[in-house]
Image: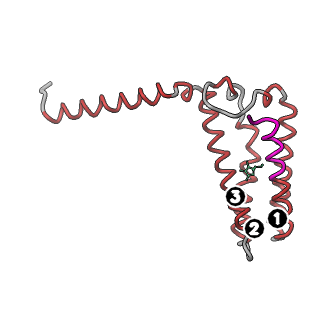
Amino acid sequence: MALTKTTLSLTAATIGLVIAAGAALAADPAADTPGGKAVLARQAHYRELNAAFRAVNEDLRKDMPDKAAVAADVGKMKALTDDLPSWFPKGSGPEAGVKTRAKAEIWTDAAGFATAATRIQAETGKLQDAATAGDIEALKAQAKTVNGACKACHDAYRG
Ligand code: ASC
C-alpha cells in the first residue's frame, strides 16, 4: 500500500477512533454489560419521567393551565410508570458496577418494591383520570399524592 497523504491521514483517523472507543470502555467497562446497560437505560427513563412530571407541575402553577399539554404530559407519565417495574432486571443493582442509587432491597424485598411500584401506577392512573376530566383542582391535589408515592419509594429503595 502506497503511503500517500490520504492513506496516512485515514490511518491516523482510524487510530484516533480506536483510542477514543478504548478510552470510553476503559472509563467504565461495566457500562457495556447487561446490568450496566440496564442502569443507564433506567436513568434515562427516570429523567423522562421527571421531565414530564415537572412540566405538569409547572403548568398547574399557572393561572390558566394548558389542559391539553397537562393531559399529554400525564399520558407520558402513565406510560412510563406502567413500564417502571421492567426497568429493574436482576443484575442492575449495586452489583452492576456502574454508579447507581438503586438499593439491593429492590430485589431482596421484591414484594415490597412491587407494592411501591403498583402504588405509583395507581396514583398516576388517578392523575390521568383528573386530566381526562380537565379538573385542575383535582389534578393539583393528585399531583401531590403522586409526589408522595415517588418519595415513599425513593426513601425505601433509593440510596
Ligand atoms: C418529582 C421527581 C421526583 C419526585 C420526588 C418526590 O417531580 O422528579 O423524584 O417528584 O421529588 O419526593
The answer to if 43 sits in the magenta stretch is: no
Residue found at x 76% / y 53%: 78
Secondary structure of the residue carrying numbered label 2: helix
Q: Position of residue 73 (x, y in %)?
A: 70, 60
What range is drawn magenta here?
Answer: 147-159
User: Residue visible at 70% across and 55% down?
Assistant: 76
Q: Residue at x 71, y 67 (%)?
A: 59
State the residue in front, 99 or 22: 99
Q: CA distance from mark 2 to mark 3?
A: 10 Å
In terms of sequence position, does the residue under pointer 3 or pointer 1 come before the other? 3
Q: Residues within 10 Å of mark 1 (few under 14, many from 20)?
A: some
Horizontal and vertical percent for residue 157? Answer: 79, 35
Per the image, the residue denoted by label 1 is: 140
Q: Position of residue 79 (x, y in %)?
A: 73, 51
Count all numbered tags in the image, as a single digit.
3
Mark 3 CB within 8 Å of ligand 1: yes
Query: Mark 2 — residue?
Result: 60
Q: Which mark is residue 54?
A: 3
Three-letter code, disc 1? Lys
- Asked if residue 115 lies left or right of residue 3, the reply is right
In the picture, which quadrant includes the C terminus? top right
Q: Secondary structure at mark 1?
A: helix
Which quadrant would residue 142 be assigned to in this image?
bottom right
Q: CA distance from mark 3 to mark 1?
A: 13 Å
Query: Residue 154 in magenta?
Result: yes
Residue 121 drawn at (x, y percent): 82, 48
Q: Is residue 35 above or below residue 57?
A: above
Amino acid at circle 3: Arg
Marks 1,2: beta carbons within 8 A: yes
Quadrant of the frame with the N terminus: top left
